[in-house]
Image (cartoon, coloured by chain):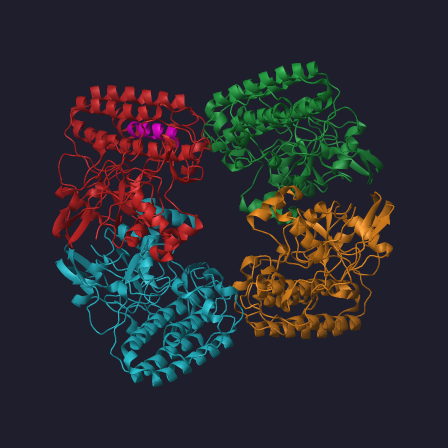
Chain colours: A green, B orange, C cyan, D red
Amino acid sequence: MSPSHPSVARSALDFETLNAQYRRVRSATLAIASPLSAEDCQVQSMADASPIKWHLAHTTWFFETFLLDAFDAGYRALNTSYKVLFNSYYNGVGNKHPRSERGMISRPSLSDVLAYCSHVDAAIESFLLNADPKDREQIAALMVLGFNHEQQHQELMFTDLKHLLSINPLAPVYAANAPQPRAISASAIQWEAFEGGIVEVGHQPSTDFAFDNESPRHRVLLQPYQIADRLVTNGDYLSFMQDGAYSDHSLWLSDGWDWVQQSSIDSPMYWRQDEAHQGWQTFTLSGLKPIDLEAPVCHVSYFEADAFARWAGVRLPTEFEWEHAANARRGLKQLNDTAWQWTASAYLPYPGFAPARGAVGEYNGKFMNQQYVLRGGSCATPVEHTRLSYRNFFQPDKRWQFTGLRLAR
Amino acid sequence: MSPSHPSVARSALDFETLNAQYRRVRSATLAIASPLSAEDCQVQSMADASPIKWHLAHTTWFFETFLLDAFDAGYRALNTSYKVLFNSYYNGVGNKHPRSERGMISRPSLSDVLAYCSHVDAAIESFLLNADPKDREQIAALMVLGFNHEQQHQELMFTDLKHLLSINPLAPVYAANAPQPRAISASAIQWEAFEGGIVEVGHQPSTDFAFDNESPRHRVLLQPYQIADRLVTNGDYLSFMQDGAYSDHSLWLSDGWDWVQQSSIDSPMYWRQDEAHQGWQTFTLSGLKPIDLEAPVCHVSYFEADAFARWAGVRLPTEFEWEHAANARRGLKQLNDTAWQWTASAYLPYPGFAPARGAVGEYNGKFMNQQYVLRGGSCATPVEHTRLSYRNFFQPDKRWQFTGLRLAR
Amino acid sequence: MSPSHPSVARSALDFETLNAQYRRVRSATLAIASPLSAEDCQVQSMADASPIKWHLAHTTWFFETFLLDAFDAGYRALNTSYKVLFNSYYNGVGNKHPRSERGMISRPSLSDVLAYCSHVDAAIESFLLNADPKDREQIAALMVLGFNHEQQHQELMFTDLKHLLSINPLAPVYAANAPQPRAISASAIQWEAFEGGIVEVGHQPSTDFAFDNESPRHRVLLQPYQIADRLVTNGDYLSFMQDGAYSDHSLWLSDGWDWVQQSSIDSPMYWRQDEAHQGWQTFTLSGLKPIDLEAPVCHVSYFEADAFARWAGVRLPTEFEWEHAANARRGLKQLNDTAWQWTASAYLPYPGFAPARGAVGEYNGKFMNQQYVLRGGSCATPVEHTRLSYRNFFQPDKRWQFTGLRLAR
Amino acid sequence: MSPSHPSVARSALDFETLNAQYRRVRSATLAIASPLSAEDCQVQSMADASPIKWHLAHTTWFFETFLLDAFDAGYRALNTSYKVLFNSYYNGVGNKHPRSERGMISRPSLSDVLAYCSHVDAAIESFLLNADPKDREQIAALMVLGFNHEQQHQELMFTDLKHLLSINPLAPVYAANAPQPRAISASAIQWEAFEGGIVEVGHQPSTDFAFDNESPRHRVLLQPYQIADRLVTNGDYLSFMQDGAYSDHSLWLSDGWDWVQQSSIDSPMYWRQDEAHQGWQTFTLSGLKPIDLEAPVCHVSYFEADAFARWAGVRLPTEFEWEHAANARRGLKQLNDTAWQWTASAYLPYPGFAPARGAVGEYNGKFMNQQYVLRGGSCATPVEHTRLSYRNFFQPDKRWQFTGLRLAR
């Protein structure tokens, strides 16, 4: 999801557990950045992406702003100008630096930002040791929200970095074992059939965390449907390409056809024709690799997913079909560890949806326009971050995330 | 709806009735153009609009292409180059002239186009006299589709013309009694309450015409809801404006807020502050008029409708709530003769939706992306054109149609 | 020249002669428009061009503003709003309508504008009958300026109209004998040699009219040079094309190479490859015609003229070489009746240049930036409008005027 | 000058002297970068600028390509992909990386690039020790060209860096004693008068280096003129601003007025109104400083320089007036160590100008379009780099260089 999505969090966690979780989440973030140079962390390679340095600073800013500034009277900021520089889109907490110019700010340097991380980490640890027990529930909710916010940015760090390295003519390698959707033995699709009827969807009220856009849990009416047991593979997708799909207007939404023509799209993002090897390669975080026909197709837009389904004579599932089928736990593979799965559902509020109050929660609903819901999770999503009720969302032309598709009919 | 949407039509009409209807529909189109000069009919005042001359020619082209060329072996075109010039977006029937350059084509002239209308009108009348009875059902379906297609363009002629005249510094008058939403006595909103539950929506299969996007009729589950008996008025909207709504980011969708700021929006389209008269005026097809506080607000975008509802502490209805409440026939005013009503529903296919085959029907589904559904009808909609199952649709920033809003909660 | 350039005029003409000239110039303008429909006169086909209707009204506005409003106390305007609508770029005389939206104004209609012409024509004739003899010199100067201003617009009417008709897929014909550069027997170029030295250039002070940018007359130092006796032909230019010039960066100025690539330029404007006839055609005001290899190449930009000269191993003349050689009257053909001739000279003020005072003359200098001087005149230039000291000017990528080239070395 | 301008060089230098000069020039380049972080060296803050890292690599690439690759059979490149990455605009030597994406390339890192510098430096030193004496003259010419090329980039490093730091909200300081135009005691302007006549301009053929655009030396005819002894100061310019110059269209070239309005220009680049201190500040490489009224105004565009001169009732000098007056050595201050001085001359070839052959020299002429000549030199120009015949050039809206003005009349 383009920006992050603070929301109501429920938690019964004690301060010690929070502290342990905090250290674990923060270490994971730093681990992603650790193989990178100061230059790698500086560049914003397109408007949709942010510099790694910015991700590091912004996730830190989140804890500083919503925990330390809010609850810790003794906290002293390392640098007050960071308040504006590292605010993403929270108008309610003051000014922000223009999103498209995040890569222009060479100072603070990466090492300054790492010092900022350490400063806030130390302050948080000390704060949790001394926090007032009467604030426990509110603090725990915000801390858990911060963990989830940071996990979203961990995924964005991988995808933004992938884009950055992809435009470098040297085709650099981030790491040999970096996230990349893996093949399973891709036999023919098995269709799992469901009766439909009135079913419940959305987050089950509990002490577990969920974003506010997953609530309220409510009933929907499903028609009978079938859903594929696996994702569409590169091999499947190559057939679609070889059938001339990118030059057949009848397969595309009107806006999708405009996008294909204006952007000269003829394959998934990061695919490159390699004349020497007489085939397709794809750029990965581990460098250029030949296409694995059994691996799921990835980095496709909603327009491509929708056109593929139309070409195949079927359709994409709705988000509620997806959730219902996933909950049924019958044979569905690659649910949340491979690629996000475009659904046919527009990203809209659930009946009775009410955003949380104040800056921390005011802003989930405001992105509910002209985006589509994706379900599941990807190879770049922290595993504890996914849920079957989770709603990711992007505009239909976006494809720098690890986005694939699962068919329905 | 930006372009028009041919679809499957069912009809049991005989050729004589078709002929009479044809004459009636075509006369209505010409009547709209009759007060206009050749220059008025030439200009395309923005990319969303088309020249009146083009509307005249394109509706004629429709009957020529889908009736005469398809069924009348003896038909001779007046000018074969019109095939390309007046195709709107039907890729399946050949090339088309770029939409944004429709106003650049000074030839054929208006009188050439009127001759083209007469040529096709004469050919259709003669064709219907001599058509093969075995084709009757198919011909009737296409004729009825042509009538509905033309009625959509009649509405567009009014709205495109309104935009054209509005940008002329002379503020010209089209006609004293031109379409404009009228006031009803606007007392406080009455809320009509509905229980919800499983209800049927969509076009009831019958011999009556409907567009394919209204089918299949299907069941949906509604939560209990209330809906306003009348549209939001200019007076209501002025309160919203005076409360600073256009400068309060918290009321707007994120994309809406960008739109407000980038386009310097501070009032509905066509509103102008008149310092001399110390108040707001609005440009109408009858010239500049003072705002009528009891008339429904009109020419607002989805972003504005959504922000108004949020400001009022309520929301927009879904398209299914709207349809269900309208069918209940309890107290709802201004349903289809005043202003189109933005709903909270994304424009998406109904379950099982399948577009008609061939060029005439292939293209409804392709616009189902990033648009919102409007329900009802406006003062510019031919009265026999509206239906309670009718789905109009536009992008959320569009407002040159007669678009207003009705609240729900 | 993109807009026209009023300037100081000197005149000893009496009122009767002025009246006769006025009628002659005005008739010529109307004659250009007379074969055109209201629609033809309405459209602005690109930002550089203006609608014919606008040209008619603006030239009329000139006499109304600078003569009638200034000197005739009894004059009553037909419509005061025309003051703003038909001002081109004279900030000193009030507001103006945005240039790029001239084609959006459907009212006043063509017939309204023709009535405006008649109204002003009658008023001018009556005014000249009764004008105060003490104002004679000032009035005569302004009238002569108006004639020259109007002659510039006569040329623009042809070139703007040519562009308009060229984008119509019907390739309409304006007139069988419309302006088009004609062939002379194009034998090999003869080089006329000149010694150079100190020579005088610029307008010779006299009672004849000249624009202010042709003054002051001054001395320049020329190196010895040779200049071609004729213009470069289509045949010459075809050799350049066939030699791969449009894909050889080494022939082009850097900005020219960008222009070629970004605009996909591969031939002069209006040239079209006709596969059926296996050759090049060109769109003319008399319709599509095969290329005449002996006719001068026309509708080339400065970038193309400069690249051609480089390819030919020579160069373009400076504006002073051109003027000096033309004055020498030795063998130079096609001086001012065929195509404007790009020179290597930037359009800059002559030493001591001072613009005339007030709105009428304030604005010649302001266009002296990033344009090149063209000398001579074209098939569309009124013959009495040209002079050997005349300085036309355009940006280096412009080519909708009748622009060709003559070589020097 | 936007890019650098290799040209014919003449030299009688021996290899040892060349080696010493090489070390001196290269050290100066590294010294500019030495206070900067890897992030500072990575960012391209606008399309006109390049990253410092790119400047370091490109100047190195120059010696590698034109010396080592051309003359040293034993040379082994450190990384052959640098050939494409660090080519600026020499189409003749192969592909190049898009200019606007220079800041997107995070690898090679700054330390990789510094290693590249060392690699080439070592190779050059060894090459000069062993070079074939018969190539001495050609090698010396190319080496001297490389020195001059590199000095141009040294100046660009300062100006590009200044822009980068200026857009950082933290207003960082590069160095306390960084280049900035200094005040002299600015008493009233003294006008130095010259008779004009036929004078010689351009580079005097000699063994000294000059760029090819300074040749051939030739005669021009000057009218009598006067030129100011000093540059226009901030104090002078403030009077112009306070007189409302930025809102008076009559002072501006037409394109300049469009630029002022579209870019909301109201002061020289880097000026900022400081409400707290009630006055103007300017961003410098040493941080934000109050305006020094006696220092020369700097970072003005040609449009601003021209408007200022018009406001003052005088004009800018031509490049030949400037050169002639400078050579006369009578009272002119701030010639080449303060700010480049806009002239009224378009950047065009001298009579008989012929670019050098091959990639190294092919490209000076191609920038001779729509630019103005600046003369002198600035506080950021290496002192041995300037000459009285030196022709710098920029488009009229550019002002990120240290550009000021000197008046003439």
Residue B203 lies in what quarter of the image?
bottom right
For the N terminus of chain B, the image quarter is bottom right
- Image vertical order of residue C58 relative to residue D360, above or below: below
Number of marks in the rendered image = 0
Which residue appears at 78% of the width and 48% of the height?
B408
Q: Position of residue D54 (x, y in %)?
A: 38, 30
The secondary structure that most of the magenta stretch takes on is helix
Q: Nearer the viewer, residue A147 or D273?
A: D273
**The magenta segment:** D51-64
Specify whether residue C51 is in view: no
Q: Is residue A145 magenta?
A: no
> Between residues C38 and A284, which one lies in front from this camera angle?
C38
**Is B205 situated left or right of C372 in this image?**
right
> In screen coordinates, is B118 left or right of C113?
right
Residue B161 spot, x, y in % from top left: 61, 65
Residue drawn at point x = 38 percent, y = 26 percent: D80
In depth, the one of C143 and B116 nearer the eye is: C143
Left or right of residue B17, residue C128 in this image: left
Q: Is residue A140 left or right of residue C318?
A: right
Q: Quadrant of residue B382?
A: bottom right
Residue C52, x across and y down, in percent: 45, 70
- Whether D53 is among the magenta residues is yes
Which residue is more in the foreground, A322 or B155?
B155
Residue B84 in sight here: yes
User: Residue A267: image x %, image y %?
Assistant: 57, 38
